[in-house]
Image: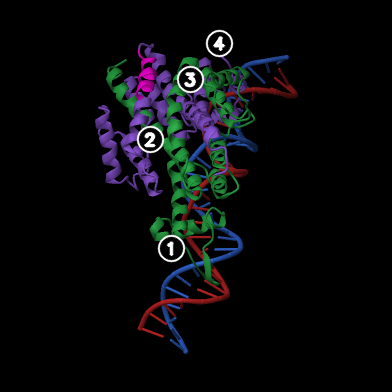
Chain colours: A green, B purple, C blue, D red
Amino acid sequence: MIPMWMSELSQRSGLPVATIKFYLREGMLPPGTATGATRAHYDETHLRRLRLIRALVVVAALRLEDVRTILAAVDDESLTLHEVVGAAHTRLSATDASSPASSEARARVDALVRRKRWRLATDSPHREALAKGLDALSSLDQPVSDDLLDEYAAAMGPIARREVGSVVGEAPATATERAVVGTVLLEPVLLTIRRMAHEHVSAGRLGRKS
Amino acid sequence: MIPMWMSELSQRSGLPVATIKFYLREGMLPPGTATGATRAHYDETHLRRLRLIRALVVVAALRLEDVRTILAAVDDESLTLHEVVGAAHTRLSATDASSPASSEARARVDALVRRKRWRLATDSPHREALAKGLDALSSLDQPVSDDLLDEYAAAMGPIARREVGSVVGEAPATATERAVVGTVLLEPVLLTIRRMAHEHVSAGRLGRKS
DNA sequence: CAATATTGGACAGTAACGCTATCTAATGTC
DNA sequence: GACATTAGATAGCGTTACTGTCCAATATTG
């Protein structure tokens, strides 16, 4: 590990010193090793952490509070990989509790989970998040059919299996970060590919005036 | 169409009068028909529009500027369905131009598009968005394989075909809104299902300490 | 060894976003 | 005629994510 000073950390990360200091204050970036009252040096792990923060903020569009929670889970060595990923997911799927989903929507979600024989925590935030999504579509007179839900689920099953599989057997130290990064940062990748597919299909079928 | 006053619109939409006035000012909600200098009435279309705005803001987590752009596209009758959906997508995939993606990543995206024989605009914002996503993963030492990209693409193809197909043949008046709503609001639904699948697979394989 | 530059640490300030509140004058309503 | 409601204009507020300034303590350079 070649140590570097604050200025170099700033240059290599492309972030202003003021911003790095801000992340330090917020506890998102661990402090460097002090070499005097007004000096400290940093290493590659700091650079890596900064890149992770920026990726979560810029690419995954997460709020800093969520980034903080996710980093805390990644840093907590007492958690299993499943728990760390769960913590990240919980943040992503967190919804406003003051306007709960309809019981109909929740029943449909539960039915989906049963059909797929998914082992989901009873209080998994995804249930409520999905139910709210269904409600929103319904309130706009565009209910989502169980059929479409099944198609989504069928498409995501193999993908999830592959993604999780690629993490199993990693060295524990990097596995958690790898799992979280993979889970969170692949979301925008998947969505963009869906948009591309939409553009392609739509160009073929909706190009004419309608 | 049964007309209603502002107070009723507020009650039925669940939004404060001040907020509705704000959307009116911003041009996101068309004005009601004036029945005097200090009176106007609204109808179901206003209620529907408010629900659409809230769904885009709350469920799809869009910024108001993006919602404005999308609504303007929906309201513009001179656009084809493909163009309206394209406008929505452009907003969703908009990235910061000041830090462009690497040429390597862009080359890989172009290669993917060629492999899938997708008809994408040369300047489609999705190309840059996807390339940036790949760069972010790479900079964290977790490059995305072409293999995974292909799997994503293979999974999204049929889904896009089905989704676009369900809009073809709709009455033009509602088709654009339907297309946009379907495109944008199904994204969180799809992501949540992916998270559920992850939780399921992960519970089975990562439950132990690692 | 003196002049200059850099750093850590504390704290105040700012820009964008999305509302929210207040005020006024003109109506409706009872 | 008293009271409530509304359109329209404008000002203010709370949150988020930084950004800038200041200071004293070192380093560095000539």
CA neighbours of label 3 inside 10 A, class few (<14), some (14 to 19), many (20+): some
Residue B70, numbered label: none
Amino acid type assigned to the residue bearing label 4 in the image: Ile
Tell whether A168 sits left or right of B167. right
Label 2 residue SS: helix
Nearest to the eye among marks 4 and 3: give it: 3
Quote the CA–CA distance across marks 2 and 1.
Answer: 37 Å
* Residue drawn at (33%, 31%) of the image: B150
The correct choice, above or below, for A57 with respect to B13 in the image is: below
Whether the residues at callouts 4 and 1 have beta carbons within 8 Å, the answer is no
Q: Where is residue C30 in the image (x, y as percent from the top left)?
A: 73, 14
Please give the residue where the numbered disc 3 appears in the rendered image.
Answer: A149
Quote the CA–CA distance across marks 4 and 2.
Answer: 39 Å
Nearest to the eye among marks 2 and 1: give it: 1
Amino acid type assigned to the residue bearing label 1 in the image: Met
Nearest to the eye among marks 4 and 2: give it: 2
Residue A1, numbered label: 1
Subunit that carries the residue with mark 4: B
Please give the residue where the numbered disc 4 appears in the rendered image.
Answer: B2
Please give the residue where the numbered disc 2 appears in the rendered image.
Answer: B93
Whether the residues at callouts 2 and 3 have beta carbons within 8 Å, the answer is no
Q: Where is residue B52 in the image (x, y as percent from the top left)?
A: 49, 23
Q: Are marks 4 and 3 on the same chain?
A: no
Amino acid type assigned to the residue bearing label 3 in the image: Leu
Label 1 residue SS: loop
The correct choice, above or below, for A67 with respect to B15 in the image is: below
Q: Do labels 4 and 2 share a chain?
A: yes
